[in-house]
Amino acid sequence: MDPRFFRWHEIPTRVPKEGVTMRVVSGDKGMMVFFDIGPHTEIPPHSHPHEQMGTVLEGEITLIIGNEERLLNAGDGYVAPSGVAHGARTGNQGAKVVDFFSPPREDYR
């Protein structure tokens, strides 16, 4: 794959947990991850040293960042600062989300 150009559907999927598939594209200083999150899936609160920001492409997802909880729909975005606990859960329809991490997550490479 040419690292300058890609098609999401051609990137192999991984399943980090039941109900979640992911596709990863990484550069030297940042990483994009396409997540397809099934209905009624929970991503427990966690934190990491990476700054994480993203946008909802389809569906809806409830995102918790620190002590704040918001229902996000297609077109909504978010930023989870480095070291701040965050988690998510989907409802009946699930969600498609693209996240950006800086620096890249070694555990996702």
Image (cartoon, grey):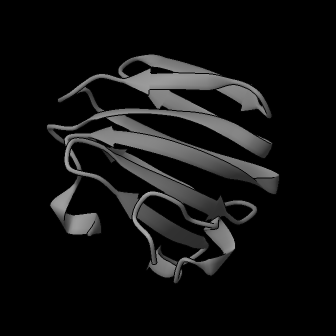
Locate the C terminus by quadrant.
bottom left
User: Can you say whether 10 is above or below 104 in the image?
Assistant: below
Q: Is residue 67 depicted above or below 24 in this figure?
A: above
Question: Disc count in the image?
Answer: 0
> Where is residue 13 shown, x and y percent of the image?
53, 80
Q: Which residue is at 45% across, 78% downward?
A: 1
In percent of width and height, residue 8 lies at: 63, 66
Whether residue 61 is visible, yes or no, is: no
In the image, taking residue 99 as reference, residue 105 lies left or right, namely: left
Residue 38 x, y percent position in the rendering:
71, 66
Would you identify the image quadrant in which residue 75 lies? top right
Q: Is residue 105 above or below residue 20?
A: above
Q: Residue at x 43, y 23 (%)?
A: 79
- Relative to 59, 108 lies left or right: left
Residue 50, by quadrant, is top left
Residue 49 drawn at (x, y percent): 14, 37
Q: Is residue 82 left or right of residue 68?
A: left
Q: Residue at x 38, y 35 (%)?
A: 86
State whether residue 54 is above or below residue 19: above
Front residue of 12 and 93: 12
Residue that lies at the very extreme toward the top in this rendered image: 68
Res. 20 visible in picture: yes
Q: Residue sitting at 48 percent across and 80 percent down? A: 15
